[in-house]
Amino acid sequence: MSDSQSKKNAKAKLSNSSEVLQGLFENGKSSLSEQFIRWKLWRKWGEFTGPSIGEISEPVGYRRGILYVWVKNASWMQQLIFMLEPLKTSINKKLGINYVKGIHLTLDRKAVPSDEHQKQELRQAVESLMKEGDES
């Protein structure tokens, strides 16, 4: 087997592995799936909302189905109030699941509630994965 062919096979395996991993995270059954979906939404915010909304807003929190979105100023907040339902529908459609049940707009990034239970679950899931990795 040539060197270039073995590199192609390695890339194919890596691609397949990443697709499997992404599928596991997106199916909602993994303990890390909510965090993965959240990361995906944060990372691709402009793609989910469109460029104009993506430039003047940013997701800053998520708790119990409520997405907290920081908005650049009060004028834009007023505009977005009328777009909340279509925005929620669009996000859920692009994610392929009913992840966002409501959207709360804020001008203060610090006004987002913290969920200690969610943080603890994430820590436990990561620790569990680390232990599994050590055993193999």
Image (tube, rainbow, N blue to C red):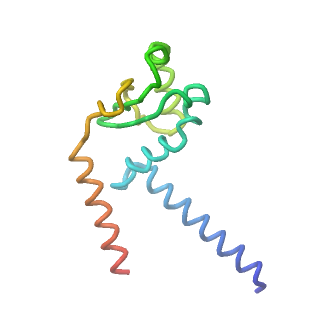
Quarter of the figure that contains the C terminus: bottom left
Residue 10 x/y as whole percent: 65, 75
* Image quadrant containing the N terminus: bottom right
Name which quarter of the figure residue 6 lies in.
bottom right
Q: 118 or 92, which lies in front? A: 118
When asked about the image quadrant of residue 99, the answer is: top left
Front position in the image: 8 or 43? 43
x, y percent for residue 63: 30, 36
Residue 57 percent location from the top left of the image: 49, 29
Q: Residue at x 36, y 25 (%)?
A: 104
Q: Compared to 114, does 80 lie above or below?
A: above
Q: Is residue 98 above or below residue 34?
A: above
Coordinates of residue 77 in the picture (x, y in percent) = 45, 18
The image shows a total of numbered marks equal to: 0
Q: Is residue 49 left or right of residue 84?
A: right
Eyeballing the image, is 90 above or below 75? below
Residue plotted at (51% across, 44% down): 43
Q: Residue at x 32, y 62 (%)?
A: 126
Q: Residue at x 34, y 31 (%)?
A: 66
